[in-house]
Image (spheres, rainbow, N blue to C red):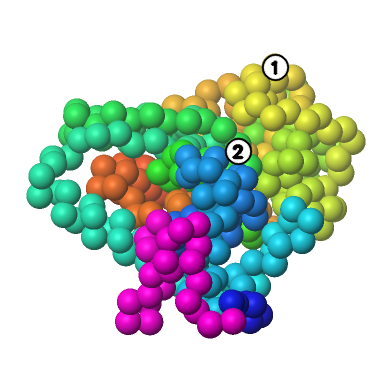
Amino acid sequence: MPLALAADGFNVICSGALEKRMGGVYGSLRDIRLFVSVYEARSFTLAAQRENATQSGVSQHVRNLEVGFGVLLFVRDKGRITPTPAGDAYYLRAIDVLRAHDAASRAVRTYAEGLDGQIVVGLMPTMTRCTLAPALARFVSAHPNVHVHVTEGYSAALTQLVRTGDVDFAIVPAFSDPAGLKSRLFLRTPELLVSSARAEARRQGGRLAEQGPLKLVLPSRSNTRRGTLETYCTTVGAEITRIIELDTMFGTLDFVARGDWVTILPALMMADGAREGFVVNPIVDPALTLDLVLIEPARRTLVPAASLFLDLLEEEARRISAAWDGAYQET
């Protein structure tokens, strides 16, 4: 969408600052960073909060880009903003620029700094129950000068923390809203039917249609896994007589262990030492799996310490999951 300009073309003065144009390249890194924040937040006000800037300042930086390019990047309408096709195209390249600059800066800083500093990681209970501790023990032993902060939460909250840059990375179930994020598959892991080991409650086999009436503990509908689990149960003809919603993983395990309710949990939660008190069976015919993805801010690269910690988490998760992959072959 062409931008209406002054009569003398591009000779426009914005807030007393002459628009900079060097060799046909418009926009400083600050301009680009603020544009990306506005694009991802769909709000000048939220972008200003995210970047510790003023709303008017953010708006002016975006306006500078639009004047320089001679095209609107956003449509403003009664307080709402929508990217134009030009804005969409610019965003895809802008995040590449920010990532490249971030990588270049980190490469230079490695000559002056050792492996220290701080990393902040977002993990779901799926990852913290069995996978976190072994990986963390190895990491802090090898890198005692790195301060590690792990935030536990569910996927929606963790995804927002990644978008705002408050965590270096998070591991969440696969989803379809990648704006502001860089993602890749972290692990595909089996889902398991978990029941109490008490004789009157134990369930054998992983074919849900053969289990008879089930009283099932599920996460609430705000949880990414809920829709997948319900669809699977309906598809295979599982007989569900009652459902309780619990958005607490450890509360779910305690509740199931005490009675005749069952639940469905990712294999990562049921490593060897975590199965006491439960009967656990891989769900089969067909197999039910969970795709976990790594998400990180689109504009940044992982610091070396975060990258190394991620490698250890991935190694431990694959080790736990592999034991259940073998169980599928035996079922």
Q: Residue at the left extreme?
A: 111
Q: Considering depth in this image, is 259 or 175 the residue closer to the camera?
A: 175
Q: Amino acid at mark 1?
A: Arg
Residue 29 painted magenta: yes
Asked if one can make out residue 209 in the rendered structure from this viewpoint, the answer is no
Residue 157 got which mark?
2
Circles 2 and 1: CB atoms closer than 8 Å: no
Residue receiving disc 1? 258
Please tell me the numbered disc located at residue 168.
Answer: none
Image point (77%, 41%), residue name: 221
- Quarter of the image for the N terminus: give it: bottom right
Q: Residue furthest top?
A: 258
Tag 1 secondary structure: loop
Q: Is residue 310 left or right of residue 129?
A: left
Q: Position of residue 65 (x, y in %)?
A: 49, 68
Residue 308 percent across, percent down from the top left: 27, 46
Q: Is residue 291 left or right of residue 143?
A: right
**CA gap, disc 2 to disc 1?**
30 Å
In this view, the residue farthest toward the right is: 241
Q: Is residue 66 visible in this depiction of the protein?
A: yes
- Name the residue type under label 2: Ala
Q: Secondary structure at mark 2?
A: helix
Indicate the quadrant where residue 25 lies. Answer: bottom left
Residue 195 in magenta? no
Q: Residues within 10 Å of mark 2 (few under 14, many from 20)?
A: few
x, y percentage for residue 147? 28, 29
Q: Residues in magenta?
A: 7-30
Q: Is residue 46 above or below residue 32?
A: above
